Structures are given as structure tokens and as C-alpha cells.
Amino acid sequence: DTAVSQTPKYLVTQMGNDKSIKCEQNLGHDTMYWYKQDSKKFLKIMFSYNNKELIINETVPNRFSPKSPDKAHLNLHINSLELGDSAVYFCASSQDRRGYDGYTFGSGTRLTVV
Amino acid sequence: EDQVTQSPEALRLQEGESSSLNCSYTVSGLRGLFWYRQDPGKGPEFLFTLYSAGEEKEKERLKATLTKKESFLHITAPKPEDSATYLCAVLLPGTYKYIFGTGTRLKVLA
């Protein structure tokens, strides 16, 4: 029944490893997002896809690569993890790209790089 | 530069003690201002969208208002279950991007 589900919820990994986070929404929304929340709780947009098309690609290292196989799924792959990548990553979705009806967020993936 | 600033950073209230949270923005041509609630260990939960100055929205003990430069989230007679971080976000003109503020951590004591 979960509207936006992310896996895994926790991820602890060593520097230099490659990891993926998966996200799925069952709301029939057209647009999905990846946000990063740092230790000061600041939420920053990373990527957005609308119907599998990349529409927002913020200034993030190219070690981060999103993939949307269909409009219900958005995954985030991170290569060569660094200590500074430690954060909580949130997936979200909205009815359309304007997001006027608000976003529905997943419960987050806490990534810890050691 | 487009900015969203929330104040105070943290607020402690006694149960029943009404107060207001502030979100000020420097975005010109506002297309939408959004309020979210975030509980510890969870993702933000959408509360309201406000589009134009003078607009108000209400939900239970929460009322959001909007002027040309800021928005207030008024909490009337809060209960401990209202304790959370309240985030506001602004939709940047000409884009589909939100800028989020850093939030106000609200603690309501029984």
C-alpha cells in the first residue's frame, strides 16, 4: 500500500564502492525526483524525470546516475562513493512536472560511507 | 539570488500555546509556495500549496497564509502530536524546481 517506496532504508558502505537505491511509486504520477538531505536537514533537488524523460539535472557529480525504466520507477546509481556522499536520499513523485498538488516522498535511504 | 529562509530554527511550545512559523522568500514572480511536515526518520508530508498573496489554507490546527514576501504557518492550540519539522518550499519561476528552506523544528510539550 506504500505510495512511494525506496530500498534499502539503510546503506552502509566503504569509500570507493558502487551502490544503487531503488524507488517505486504506485500513485500513477508522471514525475519522479531524487532529493538529498544533508546533516543540517537541507533538502536539495538532484534529478527529476517526467514520463521517463530527464527534466532536471542539477549540478551533482557525474558519479551519480539516475535511471527511469518506466514512469513508476526511478533508480539512483552512485559510483566510487565518497565520505561526502553520506546523507539521506529521498525519492518523491508528483502528479505532473509542475508539482502544484505537492510531492509524495518516500521514507528515505540513509547512506553512510565509511 | 533566490532564497527561502525559515524562522525560528527551533520552537518549543506548551500544549495549547498558539504560535506562528515564518517562511520568507526572495523569489520574484512566485508560482507556488508549499508547506510540508517532516517527522524524524520519515520523508516530508505535503500540507498546503499557496499561489497568490492573500490566500489562506487551513487543516485542523494549522493555517497557512501568504503575502508578497513571506508565508506564515499558524498553529492554534497545538498538541504534542504536532511536534515535527515544518518545511516550506518555493517553486522557482521558469522552472519546475523547488527551493526548500531549512525548516523549523517544533516541539510541543504536554
Image: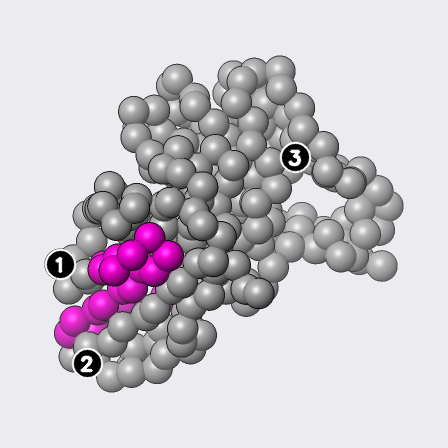
Residue designated by label 2: A17
Q: Amino acid at mark 3?
A: Leu
Tell me which numbered mark, 2 or 1, is placed earlier along the sequence: 2
Q: Amino acid at mark 2?
A: Asn
The image position of residue A59, as x and y in percent, is 19, 48
Query: What chain is tagged by disc 1?
Result: A
Q: Secondary structure at mark 3?
A: strand
Q: Quick one: A98 or B44, which is closer to the camera?
A: A98
Q: Is residue B76 magenta?
A: no
Q: Nearer the viewer, mark 2 or mark 3?
A: 2
Q: Quadrant of residue B39 in the image? A: bottom right
Q: Is label 3 on the same chain as label 1?
A: no
Look at 77% across and 49% down and name the residue there: B13
- Relative vertical location of residue A18 with respect to residue A23 in this rendering, above or below: below
Neighbour class for label 2 at 10 Å: few (<14), some, many (≥20)? few
In this rendering, does residue A70 appear at all? yes
Q: Which residues are magenta?
A: A66-89
Residue designated by label 1: A62
Q: Amino acid at mark 1?
A: Asn
Query: What chain is tagged by disc 3?
Result: B
Query: What chain is tagged by disc 2?
Result: A
The image position of residue A7, as x and y in percent, is 40, 73
Q: Quick one: A20 or B82, which is closer to the camera?
A: A20
Q: Quick one: B42 or A70, which is closer to the camera?
A: A70
- Relative vertical location of residue B33 with respect to residue A5 in this rendering, above or below: above
In this rendering, does residue B18 appear at all? no
Residue designated by label 3: B73
